[in-house]
Image (cartoon, rainbow, N blue to C red):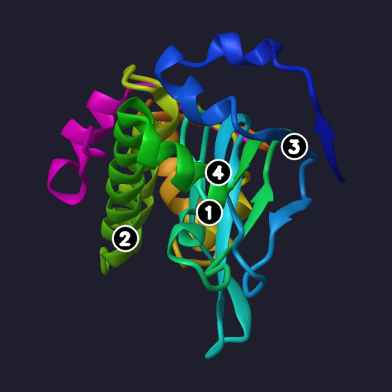
Amino acid sequence: MVTSTRDQSFLKELPLSQLPLVELGATRVIEPGAALWHEGVEARSIGIVLSGVAFITRFDPVGSIDTPTGVAAAGQLIGHDALAGGRRTSTVSARTRLRVCVIHVDRVLDVVQRTPRAALLLTSLLAQHAAIAEGAAAASRDPIVEGRVVRWLVHLAAQLGRGVDHAVIPLSQADLAQLCATRRPTLNVVLRSLVQAGAIDVSRSRIVVRDVAALVDRYGERTTRLAS
């Protein structure tokens, strides 16, 4: 389910530097499991996640399945493909209840041309998006399953934990298995070893990284931190 609201009170939770763009858009609320955008439709707007976690997938024509490519969380840009025109290159759906400020691309381009502060913000959001995408790609490239799992956990913890040394990742084990391109039984073996090492806790719908630094130290050669 997707709804819209004019309630702007949650904007106080965002850094003030983001307001030049956020104030241009309308807020949409997406319930878990629902899609904000579908791959292949015309891209007319960008989004800034205000709260919650979005799951991003791309259709794989070889396997005829939707392949996860990453997540987006509060303060992060989604739908940047609209800036270049054309169609959506991925599907964005809600994993938790999601609030997104959706801004028509024409309004974005207009304010960026007129306002240096807005141009700087957009540049910052695009750079952040590129860093997150590279971190996700690096995690996916590891040829060893354990390496992929650990890299994804460190990447997600850095992305969702906002610089602290622990993080709650609101994804199921099935979600993580998809991100890591492995089967649930294989993932479970890796997660059990990490739980036994005290690096993570696992429940039905979330994974808690208890100590990112310890996880990196223990599996240092197989992990990378998300660039700040």
The furthest residue to the front:
114
Query: Circle 3 sits on which residue?
Result: 28
Q: Is residue 104 above or below residue 11?
A: below
Q: Amino acid at mark 4?
A: Arg
Question: Where does residue 90 sit, x and y in percent of width and height?
Answer: 56, 65
Nearest the camera: 121 or 107? Answer: 107
Name the amino acid type tagged 3. Answer: Arg
**Badge 3 element:** strand
Q: Earlier in the sequence, mark 3 or mark 2?
A: 3
Give the alpha-carbon distance from disc 3 to disc 4, as whole Å.
17 Å
Judging by the rendered image, the residue that carries numbered circle 2 is 137
Type of the residue with mark 1: Gly
Q: CA distance from mark 2 to mark 4?
A: 31 Å
Q: Nearer the viewer, residue 27 or 222?
A: 27
Q: Tag 3: Cα neighbours inside 10 Å, few (<14), some, or many (≥20)?
A: many
Identify the residue at image location x=51%, y=48%: 78
Taking depth in this image into account, of 186 and 47 the one nearest to the observer is 47
Crowdedness near tag 2: few (<14), some (14–19) or many (≥20) residues, C-alpha within 10 Å: some
Disc 1/disc 2 C-alpha distance (Å): 18 Å
Q: Secondary structure at mark 2?
A: helix
The disc label shown at residue 79, or none: 1
Q: In this figure, which residue is indicated by the disc labeled 4?
A: 107
Number of callouts in the render?
Answer: 4
N-term mark: 1 or 2: 1
Callout 1 secondary element: loop
Check if mark 1's residue and mark 2's residue have beta carbons within 8 Å.
no
